[in-house]
Each structure stands twice: as C-alpha cells, then as structure tokens.
Amino acid sequence: MAGIIVDDRPYQVDERENLLQACLSLGFNLPYFCWHPALGSVGACRQCAVKQFRNEQDRQGHLVMACMTPAADGTRISIEDPEAKTFRASVIEWMMANHPHDCPVCDEGGECHLQDMTVMTGHAYRRFRFNKRTFRNQDLGPFITHEMNRCIQCYRCVRLYRDYAGGRDFDAFGSRNHVYFGRHEDGTLENEFSGNLVEVCPTGVFDDKTLMPHYTRKWDLQTAPSVCAHCSLGCNTIAGERYGTLRRILNRYHNEVNGYFLCDRGRFGYGFVNSEERIRRPKSRPSRDGQTIPIDKDMILRELGPLLADKPSRIIGIGSPRASLESNFALRELVGPERFSLGLSVRDAGLNSIILDILRRGPAPSASIHDVEQADAVLILGEDLINTAPRLALAVRQSARQQPMEIVDKLGIPRWHDAAVREAAHARFGPLFIAAPYSSWFADIATETYHAAPDDLARLGFVVAHELDQAAPTASTVNPTIGSLAKRIAAVLGQAERPLVISGTACKSEAVIQSAANVAWALCKTGTPAKLCYCLPESNSLGLAMLGGKSLEEAFSIVKNGAADTVLILENDLYRRADALSGDAFLKTASKVIILDTLEHDTTAKADVLLPAGTFAESDGTLVNNEGRAQRFYQVFPAEADIQESWRWIRDLAVASGHPAQPNMTAWNTLDDVVLALSEAIPVFRRLAEAAPPEKFRMIGQKIPRQTHRFTGRTSMHAPLLMHEPKPVKDPDSPLAFSMEGYLGQPPSPLITHYWAPGWNSVQALNKFQSEVGGPLRQENPGVRLIESFGKRTVTYFTDAPKPFQALDHGWLILPWYQIFGTDELSARASAMAERIPGPTLMLHPEDAATLRFKAGERTELMLGNRSHRVPVKLDAAVPRGTAALTIVSDFTDAVLPAWSPLIRVAEP
Amino acid sequence: MSSLRSHDRELITQHSALITMLSDVERAEIEEELLHYPDKQAGCVEALKVVQRHRGWVSDESLKSVAALLGMTSEELDSVATFYNLIFRKPVGRHVIFLCDSISCWVCGYDIMRKGLQNRLGISMGETTPDGRFTLLPIVCLGACDRAPTMMVDDDLHEDLTTEKVDRVLEQYP
Amino acid sequence: MERPLTHNIKPRAEPLWLAEYEKAGGYESVRKALRTMTPEEVQKLVTESTLRGRGGAGFPTGKKWSFVPMGADAPRPKYLVVNADEMEPGTFKDRLLLEGDPHQMIESMIVSAYAIQADVGYIFLRMEYGIAAARLRKAIKEARAKGYLGRNLLGSDFSFEIYLHTSAGRYICGEETALLNALEGKRAIPRAKPPFPQVVGLWGKPTIVQNVETLCNIPHIITHGVEWYRRLSRGKDGGTKIYGVSGNVKRPGAWELPMGTSIRELLEEHAGGMKDGFAFRGLLPGGASTAMLVEEHLDLPMDFESIPQGGSRMGTGTMIVLDDHTCPVGFAQNLEHFFAQESCGWCTPCWEGLSWTERILQSLEDGQGRMDEIDVLTMHTKLLAPGRTFCALAPGAMDPLQSLLKYCRADFERHIHEKRCPWRDEPNGADGARTWPVSSSMIVPTR
Ligand SMILES: Cc1cc2nc3c(=O)[nH]c(=O)nc-3n(C[C@H](O)[C@H](O)[C@H](O)COP(=O)(O)O)c2cc1C
Ligand code: SF4
Ligand code: FES
C-alpha cells in the first residue's frame, strides 16, 4: 500500500496502480477515455489530467496525466485544482469540436461515456465555429455498426481489437485530426471478439448492429443478470428486453470469469429468444403423422395428469445439458433417479463424468478464466478453443503475456503502462503449446503446434506426464519427434510457476482428457501447482454430470424392452445426441412423447405433446460452468402467456398427476424450493443456495428493480391501451422486480441488473461497482464453486495410453470441427448469426486429397451413422493424414463422430 | 503467415498470387531492403517506396501484394501507408512537383510561385494536369531555406526560384 | 577560425571520397578509439567535452550515453540511430553535413557506436534528401570495403554495421521515440518516456538516437581532445555550431562558427543584414518551434544557456527572420498549418488544438476573425504546454504563436478591425488541408 494525498486529504492506495485507477477506486470522479482497466494506460487522450505537487511546499504544481503516473507513496495531487479542471474541460472542448451534436439520434445516447465525461468536466458551450470533418462509414458485417464522425480518437478500439484480441483486419489509418478506425475496405470484422468494441468505444462509433432493428434506449430496457447459454464457460451477461422481445446482451463483469469481455457468439447469439420458431403455446399432435394443434394449458395438464399418475413406472425422463439444474432436477424427481436419463449418449455422458471425476479427485484444481489469464505456461490438448470455448482463447492470449512480464518487471516498467510493456516485451510470447487435430488463426502466438489424431494427442499427453514424473505411465513406441516435443513441453511446464493444462471433450476422446489430467497431476506431484481447465460442450454439461443419470442408450433400451412407454423430454433434440436411426426408433416405439422446449427442432417434430419452456431470458435457474461454478441466471422479462420455466411445467405435471411418489414436489412454489430440495438431495449441491440470494432477500425492505429509474419511455408503454400503468408482474423466484420501483442503491453482486451511478450512465459505471477498479465486485463475486480439490493428495495416474493412430487405406477418420458460429444449437438460430455460419465443409490434408484426386471445392460423399452426406471439400495441410474434419453446422452433429468413412468423389457438373 | 485464418488456406494461395503481381525487380529490391532489419514489417515503408518508384503510386492491388510479401494484412500496411505524406495511395502525374510551403519559403515568395504554377498548369494544389504530366503538391521545408523559395520536381531540388526559373525548370520534365 | 565539422566541405562540390577523406585525417578517431581506448574512456571524453545535442533539445550527449546498459549482460543487440529527419521548417544544417561530408557521418557513427557498444547503426534520413542518400550509400559501401564496417573492425573484437533508412515524409519522425516506431515499420507515434530509448528502444533494445550534427562532433573530440574542443566555443558549452539564417536577409546561409556567437553577428555580419527595403521585426532563433525574439534580444549569444533569457530556445540554431513586408498573422498561420498537418494524431490537445488554432488564424487572414478568438489562441498557448501533450510537437507549435501574440498583438487586432489582411489585396486563399494523395476513400475532408 502507498499513502497518497488527494486535495489535501490522505488516502491509502495500491502502489502497483496508476493514479487514475487509484483515484477511481477511491470513488473520485476523474474523467478518462483512452485508459481501460483491462487494456492499461497509453496516455493518448489527456483527459485524466491532475495537478501533482513535488512536496508540501510546492504550491505551484504541474499537470500530469493520472493514468501515466504511478500511485507512489507520498504522491500529492489535486483533482480540484482550477488549472487541472480547466485543462480537462478543454480536452472535452477539443473532442467536441469535430464531434456531431447528434445525441438525440445517436445509438449511444443515454449510455455514452463521452456525454458523461462532458457533463463531468463542465464543458457546455461550443466555441468552435468551423466545418467539422466527415468520414465515410464502412459496412463491418452483421454485428457492428460504424459511425466514424463520432470518433474522438482515443485509440481504445485498435488496442482492444489488435493488441488484446489479436485481430489483424482492423487498424488506424491517416493521422492528425483525420485518423480513421476501420478496415482497409468494407467487410465483416473477422475477430471473434469484435463485439467488445461496442462497450470499449466511449462514443457511438461502434455499436451493436443486432440492436438496431429493434433499437431501444438503455433506460427503456428491462435488464437482468444472466449467464451465457452458448458454451460451458458461463460468461456473465446482462440481458435487456423491451416489449416482450430480447434486445441485446452486454457483458456483466465477473472478476473470476469473463472479466470485461464476451465473445461474439455470446453477445450476438440471443436472437433465438425472439425466433418465429419458438414454441409459445402448448400443442398436441392428435395423430403421429399430422400437424400439432394449440391446446389450452389446463386442458393439456388435465390430459397428461392421469397418464403420469396411472403408470409412474412407465415414464422415462430425458434431461438436458442446456437446461438448468433446477429443471433437470425436477424431471429427475418426477420420474425417479432410476428413470432419469441425462439425454446424452454413453460416450458423451462418460466424457463429462470423467472430467468431473478428475476435477474432484485433484490434486490439480480447476482453473477459472482469470486463472487462465494468469498462467505462465499453457498446454492445450485436443481443443480448438476459439471454436469450443472462445472466451478462454482470449484468456490464453493474455496468459502468453505473463512470462514476458518478467522482463518488464525487471526494467521497472509498471504493468499498467501498456505501450511500454508491449515495447519492452516486443513480440515475445510466453510458452503456449497447442496440440489439436487442426489449427485456427489463434495459433499465431503458439510456441509450438502439433496436429494429430486424438489418439496421438493423448499419447503426447502421456509422454509429457511421464517426462515430468517417471512414475506416470507412458505410451508405447514413441517416435522421436513426439519424444522430443514432449521433452520440450515438460521442461517448460516444469519450470513454470503457474502452469496450466487445457483440454476437453472436443476430440470425444477419454484418453485425451485423461492424458491432460496426467500432465497436470505429474506437475502437482513434482511440486508445481498446475491447474486444469476442461472445456465441455454445453452450458450445463458439468452440472448435469454432477446430477447423474442414465445414458440415452439406456433410455432407448428401456423403451425398446417395453419397460416404459411414456417419454418426457426436457429441452433436448435427441437427433443431436444419437444417430438418426436409433432416434427414430425410440420416438416411434414410445407411445407418448412429451417435450418441453423453447424452439421447434427435429425431435419436436415427432412429439405428441409440446410444452412451451422459457429460454434463459424468461426463466431463472442455475448453470454449472466448466470449472464447477454454479451461477444463477435471472428472468429478464415476464414470459408471454403459457411459457414458463421447465421446472414449473414439471411441477404442474406432478400436481396434475396428484403425484404419489414425490409429494414434496407439489409444494414447490419458488425456485428457492427447488434449490433447497436439490441441495438436500445430492451432497455435491450442498452449497447451491450460496450461488445467489434467496427470493426473500431485500435491500431496506425493497426488491431490486429490473428497470431503470422512472423514464417516460416505459411509463407510457401501455398508454395507448390503458391510461394508468398496469401493475407490475410479480416475480416469485427472485429478489428482482419487473418494475422501476425498488431499491436504487447498489445491490449485492449477483443481483446487479445494470450499471449506473450518478454521473455515470455508460457501461463505465461498472467502476463504481468494483471494490477497486479492475478488481472484484463489491461484496463477493456472484456464483459458488461446487468442487474444490483441497491440498495435495496421492495421485493415481490413468494408465491406458492409446496405440498410435493408424490411417486406413480406404477410410478416413472423420473428426468434428466445431464452429464458434453455427455449432451451438441455440445461437445458430439467431438471425444475426446467419451470415457468419460457414457452410458444411470437409477439411482434408492436401496429400490425402491428392490420393483421392480431389480438388478444393469439389464435393465428397461420406457415410455417417448409416446415412450418406455430400459436402464440399477444402484442403488444409494442418489436418492430420488419414483424418478429415467435418464442420458441425446445420444438419451435422457430433453425435456419431469421430467415425470412419470412405470418401467418394462426387462427379458433378 | 501463421496468423492467417487457417480455415482459409485459399487465402494463402491468393496471397502467393498477389506476391507474383510484383515484378521480379520490385521483389528483388524489396528483399534487399529487408536484409537491413530483424523483421519484415520494419521494411514496409521502404517496400512501399520501391513499388511507388516503379509504378508512380501504390494502388490497392500493389498494397495487397506488398502486404502479402511482408506477411502483413492490408490493414496493417495501409495503416502505415496512410500515415506518411509521401506514400501516394492515389495516382499522380508523370512528374510530381513539390512546392515548399514552409516558413522560409513562404516568407520569400511561396505565394507567387504557387500562383504561377497554378496558372501555368491550370490546376490547384493536390491536382494533376489533364494530360497526366504534372501533379502539384505542397511539401514541408526542403532544408534549403537559404535558397528560398524552393521546390522539388521528382527527385531534383530547385532553389532560388523565380517565376521565370520555374518555367524553365518545368521544361526539363516532359 | 577552426571549422572542424565543415572543414572538408566545399560548396557545390563532390564530397571527399574515402581515399581523400583518409588523406585529410579521416577515420583517425576510429583507429585511436578502437586501438587505444576503452568504450568507457570514449564516453568519459564525450561527457567532459560538454557536447550538447544539436537536434533541438540540447541534452548533454555524454549523459545520454551513460544510461545505456553496458557490460557483458547488457541486452543485445544495441542500436545507434542517427536522426537525419531534418524536417523542422527553417532548418538546413544536417543536409549540409550529410551531402558535404558523408564519410564524416560514418566515422562519427563508428566511434559513437564503439562507445556504447552498439551492434547496428541506422541512419534515419528524410525521403527528400536524395543526394544525401546516394552519397551516404556510396560512403557506407566504401567504408565496408575498407573494413571500417562489418565484423571485427580493424582487427578489434568490435563489430558494427550501418544501414540507411529513408523515410516517407513526416515531421514527427524526427521526435526520437516516434522515429523508433517509424524504423520498426509502424505508424510514427511517439512513445511514452520513461522507459527511455537508451534502455528500451528499437525492438525493445537499448538505443541511442542522436542528431547528425551532434554526432559529427565526436570524431574531432576524440582526435583533438577535450581541451581543444572546449576552446572552440565562446560560451559554456563546447565546440562549434552550424548556424543558419533564412528570410529576407542579404546573404542567407549556414556557417560553422564558435558556439555562443551572438545573434547580431550572425544577422549583420554573416547574413549581411536585412535586404534593402526590408526592416527587421523579429526572428525565430532555432527553427519553426522556437519563440520569436526581437530587437532587444539581438546581443544574446546563440547558445543553450543564453537564448532562454529572451524567452526562447536555441533549438536547431538556424534562424528565420520576420520582416516588415510579411504579415505576422500569416506567418503564424503558416507555422500552425505546418504543425497541425504534421500532428501525429495521438493526443487530443495536439490533433484538435492545433487544427483549431490554424483555422482561427486562417479566418483572421481571410478577414473573418473575431476578437474572442484571440482569447482562444491565447488559451491554446497556455494549455498546450510541455507535459500536457504527449510529446514536444504541440508545445513547440505554441512557442512561436505565443510570442507573435505578444510582440505583434496589434497586427492581429488590425486584421479584425479592417476585416482583411493588411498585407494582402486579396484573401490569400491558402489551401486549407494539405491535399495529399493518401488513401482517402474513407476520409472525406469537408474543406
Ligand atoms: C516534433 C519533433 C521533431 C523533431 N525533429 C528532429 C529532427 O528532425 N532532427 C533531430 O535531430 N531532432 C529532432 N527532434 C529532437 C529529437 O527528438 C531528439 O531530441 C534528438 O534527435 C536527439 O538528438 P541530440 O541529443 O543529438 O540533439 C525533434 C523533436 C520533436 C519533438
Ligand atoms: S503532441 Fe501528441 S498528437 Fe502531437 S505529435 Fe506529439 S503525440 Fe502526436
Ligand atoms: S485516460 Fe489518461 S490520458 Fe487518456
């Protein structure tokens, strides 16, 4: 800590910070633009000027930029000094010279950092009387708008896009007061994190294009804390609604998880909530070949009740890794653990539970995204992060900066001094080894990459582990290339202070997952505190594994054997989980197929009854992310008519059946009831209730409003129908209210519905919610980690290293090639995504293609799960020989992959 | 090339096609410059100038070719190119007249020279004559302040200008 | 009078090539330093010589070198960079040295590199200096062939290479940290200091950036010693200085003279006084970014210590004279136009403040000035002070403006009252933005 004096009063601050950060942390309102807590200082905008005094005698002082000045012990500054204030107002005056006065029609209006800072500095009257400069805007693709005239040249966008996220198709052009930020020519911004420009840009240059067709001012949005539904990382979001449609997603800061940034799938994939294909009413299908017809809610419950009551033992429940813990648990309670299936194949369920087992057993603890950023040596085994866990890829990019920081520290350059840090570290990256079947651009910073079939990746892992600890089993017949690569990896990981191993389910290989554990464990055993990070397929994959249940195959055979005939499917499209033939057979054999879901899909097309479930935006629930952190998402807006949480449907079904087996369930009225039952029923969920405050929680007796303080937009929303405001809908499940009324101060962190503080209307208001700027939120971070591996325990290594991969003469091992845009079931159905989703493609090694006489662009026929498909072929030398990578988009799923298939060239005109 | 998006390997093929759009001489001259630096990007301004020397200006196409050769994206290269005053991203005439508009020349008759040139060529500053012979540009101090006013035509410095001298000088540039 | 720096230079003649240059005592300092002195001894000599940088800031050269990490575990490679960007309006001294005696430049670099144990040297030359480029290339080639460059110079274990980098036109490249970015093939935006280039410079490695003229002093200091060197000067700082005078004087030119020669001597003796019919109003002593001095300051010696007494800086030592036939507002407009155009676009006070200043001055010239905008100008001269902008470009731009407002205020006001420029019959019609053919499909200027 350092003692500093601000306007003659003493304060204690963190001496590793700069004065701007320190002052903001102390609660001072000091304006800034170019500085960003995650991007550091560069001193470009000159907005944060304060007066610094050499000592007590110095009355004159001199202006310094707070963001470029260390918060050293004994520093004396004044924020209120008239000269400093004048200078800060002048900086705004300069910025405003060319800035359009288009606030009323600007998309950023009302949540604009420039507006806030303008008011804060007190600049009010325009003296600049000359023509303003104008720019032509670019079409930057489906996600981001471009309005260059609003630019104030703070350079945050390039620093985020290029320096932080590694994008190379965006830059600054020109000079003087004519700097242009954009692309060389019109075109879609390629980088997977482009959406963060929306929040990083302090004005309205870059905005959310998906918001524009249904644009709404910030203050007219109803917002709630949410958790991203599109991968297993569980990034925290704020989702906003108006008039019953979801309008946009913003980042919700979580120090341990996503920090300041989201990936574009998470930010722009929300459109499925508003989809035409939503199931909005209960429907039944009188005849299996016929159409569904809408049916009254009570009627369908009356019809289903007796069915469930009569033969409780003949029902099978199929859960889902994309449904909340509560909904899955409700289903499990309804049908009984014996007849609860996870809705996953034996193989997929097995992969998830191996991961769970590894994380529980320890000794290597699971890494949060924040831990990943801090890692100083990383081995990735089998994952293509940018596509399977995008936000993690961004974190790994930051981890690669850790080792070069040693040079920076040695030179005495403070870490926040971003420009100097980057110059001193000059293009050096810390160790990052990527071993995966194929590569993505993200490998640009890798120390070494190794492309091989899953079995060979696992073998590499085993050999690395063995290099680290001779007691760890190795693989047989290791070729020298792998042997020496393994030695290099082992040497680097072994010397690191915070090594990390990342793996996951992408290869669909137990051995890969196990070999990653062996590496981390070998490190732990030899005294290096390694962490492990596994990527799972979906938002609640790990939670579902914790819950436990039968595989889909078991469910299929129970029905096939006639031991059950009624199927209740929770938010799951079985055709994504199993091959089409078994799916067809199962759905056909069952006499009653009841599906609870949000969108129509191949399985709902075969349902007898469809019940409309709420999406993440219309329900509350808990998801367990890949590190084992249970996080609560909240209903953003009251669902329309019959839509409700799946667990409520199941409760209703239980009530309708007069459920004899689970009398407790019928008494579930609120989410807290379900959470309580779950935490009592299954020990691993013991602490589940800690993830978020209970419904009864109040701030000074008040609920926390989801709407901003009174604004006419909302109060007059129903005016054409009814003059007085309708009574707000009650929220029985959370301490949040669908209202403008309620507690106006800062709620506990899991309940933050939006960032706002007096004078701070933009997302930058977040500063006021952190215990120190850039640090954890005030009052602990939301969520609770359900698995912690404590202390050092004995290590029992996995022993089964696979044999080397053998290519076949006439068959190729088809591997799944996941896509950030397109693979995830829900986001793929957001209209904004359409343009970014690639067409189905098979990627082949050029030499393999040559043996097949394939040329790029030609189509091939391949056989998967007894069905034949035709896809165009692309060539990529990074694809391992003997394998081929199939994009998991549109009709393609990874259900039966990896699989061997012949490749037959399709002669086409 | 490592950071190109690998699923667009065609890009690489495209890039090689781009590189071959540069002439052998251009490529050789660029490679020569690159020997002076530890990384390719450092040679990018010199590389652009090589192309400009041969083609008069740097078209989008040439820019992309040079970028491909240096392993840069077009954004990265254009970002640098548009920063510098003397990298021409638009076509210029056969000869470029750079008239010094800095302080000493301004004091010593820049305005007269400018008007003279504009009248004679029938163009304003920044424009090219319809026959494509001359482009007229201002330039900052040419470091010949003691011989003001001055101008540079292509690579040649002309000092102690008078309207008559300007006329004579222009004749040397067909 | 000794003229060590320009001794070999004959006006409008070919420079001395290697053989003649050696005959004239060339490369003696390299032999002496490499064979008889340690790098530390060379550094010590330079420190004692009181040589100060000739690029504008006047920083003591020896002191600058002392920050370079030395010894076996110093980061390698280390770099020596010659700042030959010379784009400061009114400055024409480095070109003289580069064109006139290229081998002197090479020799200077070798001994200086030896002193800081640099491995590679770059000459950062502005693009327009084509003759200098050709001569330097030839000199480098000759020197390399003769073993003055390359591995193990003169059989010592010191190795050194020199490369010529020609830029593409941008005043800010002369700012030493922006220059480093330019050399790295980036946009020439200045870097924040600290860390200083001596520690974190080119590609993150220790780097010394030095002006052409500064370096050219070094061989002579080594060959003739500190005593001799200090005696060359009339003032506290050692050596000679290349002074220049431009504007409407009888004999504009550049001369190597003892450091501390008075302004009056330069103006009246060497430049021959004002041209007939022109009266003296003031002068910028050292380039466009120095504050104007007037009659009362003429007896100040031109050195780093004395010029500040008149409220200005010695700068590059090449002065620009303002006469009574020249409009002081137009003079200011021309200067601010230059600075606004050359702003790199990084920090707000500069990229917007300078442009605003220029436009106000232009409107004064066009007869559309307003009194309250004189205050806006004054405000800028106060706000764009050192430390408040990212680099010294903007403060440098304000120095002349501030002094012109001080000494020629009445002229500014006359423009407003008469609604025209009293020095012109017609609006000057200067082209607002410099219309460079840079890629601007996306940048559509409105004026
Ligand atoms: C905007 C700006 C332009 C400059 N241009 C030059 C220049 O063209 N040549 C030069 O030698 N120094 C120039 N300088 C000064 C350099 O930054 C630096 O101080 C100098 O090269 C150091 O060399 P010296 O110590 O030998 O003078 C410039 C400084 C600024 C702020
Ligand atoms: S003062 Fe600022 S904008 Fe101007 S040249 Fe220096 S860094 Fe660039
Ligand atoms: S925030 Fe400090 S200079 Fe921009």
Image (cartoon, coloured by chain):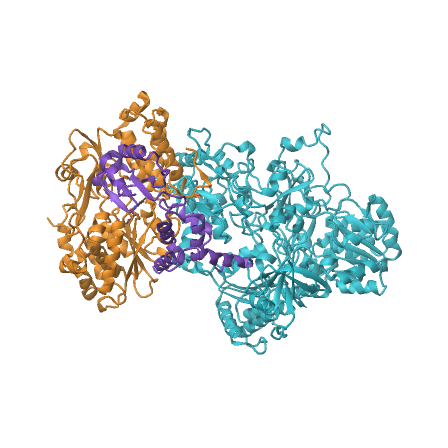
Rendering colour (chain B)? purple
Q: Nearer the viewer, residue A243 or A798?
A: A243
Dividing the image into 4 quarters, which one contains the C terminus of chain B? top left
* In this view, C394 is above or below C238: above
The residue most toward the top is C417
Rendering colour (chain C)? orange
Q: Nearer the viewer, residue C196 or A19?
A: C196
* In this view, A178 is above or below A128: below
Image coords of residue A640 (percent x, y):
74, 41
Q: Quadrant of ligand 3?
A: top left
Q: Is residue A215 visible?
A: yes
Colour cyan belongs to chain: A
Q: Quadrant of residue C352?
A: top left
Image coords of residue C136 (percent x, y):
25, 55
The residue most toward the left is C1
Left or right side of A712 for B152: left
The residue most toward the bottom is A477
Q: Quadrant of residue C336?
A: top left
Image coords of residue A769 (percent x, y):
56, 44
Q: Is residue A236 visible?
A: no
Number of numbered discs visible in the structure rendering: 0
Left or right side of C360 for A187: right
* In this view, B126 is above or below C110: above
Q: Residue at x 28, y 26 (%)?
A: C424
Left or right side of A155 for A252: right
Image coords of residue A430 (percent x, y):
47, 62
Q: Nearer the viewer, residue A631 or C252?
A: C252
